[in-house]
Image: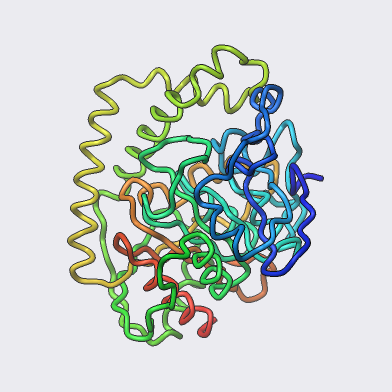
Amino acid sequence: MTTFIVRCDGSGTGPRVAVKDLIDMAGFPTTAGCRAVAETAVAATEDAACLAGTRAGARIVGRTNLNELALGVTGVNPWFGTPVNPLDPTRAPGGSSSGAAVAVMSDEADLAWGSDTGGSVRIPAACCGCAGLKTTWGRIPLEGVWPLAPSLDTVGPLARDVAGLVTGMALLDPGSDWTPVDGRSLRVGRVRIAGCDPSIDAAIDRVLCATGWPVSALPLPIWTAATEASRTVLGAEAWVANRALVESRPQGIGADVRSRLQDAGRSSGAQVTAARATAAAWRAELERAFERFDVIVTPTLTILPPTLERAADLLNARCTLPVNLAGVPALALPVPIPGIHLPASLQVIGPAGSERVLLGAGMVVEAAR
């Protein structure tokens, strides 16, 4: 049972929802996909705040597997197994919200809740061929969600299509209007990422042409520096969040994750300060870009979903980290590549609070594919 760590009854009415096992659910222990946590975890006494709408309008079918402690992009888990990519069992499912994407694309759930600190909703969406929304930082409450890097952590939905994401946002944030904004007249900035697989770039360009949007090239000089700054900030905060666990129960943490945490713990204060300065410059660059464009489009990944043996290639292939550093929302959507059974994934980025615009843009992309 590699997709789910725990299955739930799921009876009743409403959409079937799978919940990543770092979001507290009353009556169930939260494991964060980690043996060291699972061995001492006790049942939560109350739900995480983000589940209030889910309890009122949906039925929970289980708690999904993930990269250990949500620190990873491969979907590989040494303790609970690795969810099987429904597109191709030889390929990595992506992470950290691996079980969430697999549950949706295996039709074991209509919707799934994941977390996204450096791409953990969008990367598995890209690997498994579904839609995923990284929300604006602070929009969805994080009380009762296992922390990784609090200045970057977000919760968001995965679904088979944009309509499912709309339903998901209405459950995660039931107090807001989630009617998508008409996306037919958006101004689009197209960002090229060095080293991207040409077939992915071609697939994205093909669908953008079919949308009828005015698309202009957009250079973002700080993109690479922002990616590296994101790694530094994420690692430093992840070390603070997990240091006690690493020091008290090291053998209950997989060697890869333990090593990455320990490496992050060696970051100097000067390095973190410099990374946060880069973050400020990056946010300013994005603000200037959004004066010219309604949305920005990049690949989600610069490679197709890798084989399980090459899953670690996702660490350097993700185009997701700068989005978290800026705190803005982003949508990942599959786009077909002719003659290949694996899709590319397009990432649409908007300014803070623009999720409804991104959902409207996603509907236009879906119609144009």
Residue at x 56%, y 51% (from the top left corner): 114
Q: Position of residue 158 (x, y in %)?
A: 58, 61
State the residue at coordinates (51%, 17%): 244
Image position, residue 260 (x, y; %): 51, 26
Q: Is residue 110 left or right of residue 330?
A: right
Question: Residue at image x 68%, y 50%?
Answer: 99
In terms of depth relative to the viewer, which is nearer, 95 or 336?
95
- In the rendered view, does 297 fall on the left or right side of 89? left
Compared to residue 70, the image places residue 131 above or below, namely below
**Image quadrant occupied by the N terminus:** top right
Is residue 243 rendered to the left or right of residue 268?
Answer: right
The quadrant of the rendering that contains the C terminus is: bottom right
Name the one closer to the observer, 298 or 340: 298
Foreground pick, 238 / 260: 238
Of 134 and 39, the residue lying toward us: 39
Horizontal and vertical percent position of residue 9: 79, 54
Residue 187 in the image, given as x and y percentages of width and height: 28, 78
The colour style of the image is rainbow
Residue in the picture at 62% in, 34% down: 68
Q: Is residue 39 above or below residue 294?
A: above
**270 over 348 or under it: above or below:** above
| Residue 187 sits above or below residue 44 on the image | below
